[in-house]
Image (cartoon, helix red, strand yellow):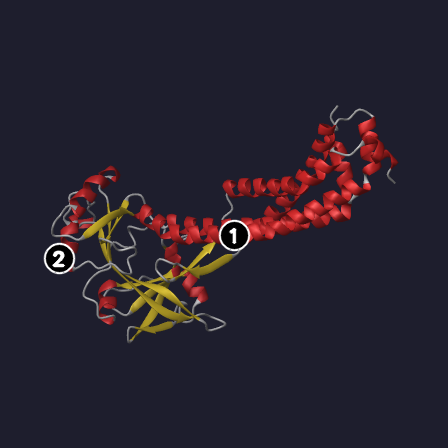
Amino acid sequence: MILPVSYSLRNLWNRRLTSALTITGMALVVFVFAAILMLAEGVQKTLVETGSYDNVVIVRRGSTTEVDSTIDRLQASIIETQPGVALGGEGRPMAAKEVMVLISLPKRGDGKRSNVIIRGIGEYSMALRPQVKLIKGRLPRPGTSEIIAGQRVATKFRGGGLGERLRFGMRDWSVVGIFDAGNTAFSSEIWGDADQLMQAFRRTVYSSLLIKLRDSNAFDRLKRGVEGDPRLTLEAKRENRYYAEQSEIMAKFLRILGISLTVIFSLGAIIGAMITMYASVATRTREIGTLRALGFGKKSILTAFLIESLLLGFLGGCSGLFLASFLQLFTFSTMNFQTFAELAFDFALSFEIVYKALVFSLVMGLVGGVLPAARAASMNIVTALQTG
């Protein structure tokens, strides 16, 4: 004979206060677990969506980011003549020679300083990134000290708003436009004329070269041509893959941190579930004896108490995920470990995170209930009926 699931549900309802406290503890643990995973997912999503499959980023061989990459003008000219590069207006190659530097800016409100990426752009930089849209003002004029700021820079940093001025590179720069790059890393950057930025920062080389493929299937041929040319010390990566690699270190760190914290917090939740189930066994000793006398075997008693514990874990997991889902309404900023610049992104909840969080909550419920359930199942019928 098997006890119905309604029996376990009724017992949880009869112990509403203790059940609610246990569910709350598990919900908080699941909330932390899901929040950290959503944080890592948000970082990866932001950086992966930054790149395009049809674009190729050229950087110095061995460089991990554009910040520590250098490409001289001769090498840039050689890349532009590669047969796989798409042609734009007047037959010119669709290639953007760009410069990337870091500056420190004070935040609005508290005045704390944080690193921001300044990107020197070329003629085709905007055309190669259709996700970047100018939403206020105008584009900077070539040969001038004019810049445009990403929407997240404009809202978070002093001097980044439309019509404001920033001073860096021993020069004053006017913000003449604000652009929105959606949920990508570009929204956390400032763009200006590459030649003007090179002069301001006393640079004679570019940081990277962004090109559009004439045919998206011609990447391997282009890569062999770039990396096999003895005149070049460069490497080519698809833009989406390049930015995906940027997210791997940070996402891995966040996941390890999240799992470590969750394991520590989960011990308390498991102990709480165990105490709740032991208390349930202690107060239902005669009931357990009666069930055994009616013909319900040890397996039925064990299963019924395990179902109660799993229900506690499942309800705690659903509650924690419900609370964590509201994090998607907020934008979070942190330092990108690869570029050492501030990166703004949103929390991202995926099916995989929901699945992992629910499995984790069920495991907590199972571990917390297995010993009390085993004790209930092993009770002697006569002794149980005489208790109380």
Which residue is depicted at the point 44% across and 53% down? Answer: 253
**For the residue marked with disc 1, what is the amino acid?**
Ser
Quadrant including the N terminus: top right
Where is mark 1, residue-wise?
260
- Quarter holding residue 115: bottom left
Where is mark 2, residue-wise?
74
Quick one: which residue is furthest to the bottom in this view? 170
Q: Secondary structure at mark 1?
A: helix
Could you tell me residue 331's position as x and y percent?
49, 57
Q: Secondary structure at mark 2?
A: helix
**For the residue marked with disc 2, what is the amino acid?**
Leu
Residue sitting nearer the eye, 157 or 102: 102
Q: Is residue 166 above or below residue 85?
A: below
The reply, left or right, for residue 346 in relation to residue 23 is left
Q: Is residue 314 above or below residue 253?
A: above
Could you tell me residue 308's position as x and y percent?
71, 38
Circle on res. 26: none
Which residue is depicted at the point 75% across and 32% down? Answer: 6
Could you tell me residue 224's position as x and y percent?
18, 42
Residue sitting nearer the eye, 96 or 115: 115
Q: Is residue 106 visible?
A: yes
Which residue is depicted at the point 72% across and 31% down? Answer: 5
- Measured Cα–Cα span from mark 2 to mark 1: 49 Å
Could you tell me residue 205's position as x and y percent?
19, 62
- Quarter holding residue 84: top left
Q: Is residue 122 visible?
A: no
Q: Which sits earlier in the primary sequence, circle 2 or circle 1?
A: 2
Which residue is depicted at the point 74% across and 43% down? Answer: 278
Do the CB atoms of the residues marked 2 and 1 lie less than 8 Å apart? no
Residue sitting nearer the eye, 36 or 310: 310
Callout 2: few (<14), some (14-19), or many (20+) C-alpha neighbours within 10 Å? few
Quadrant including the C terminus: top right
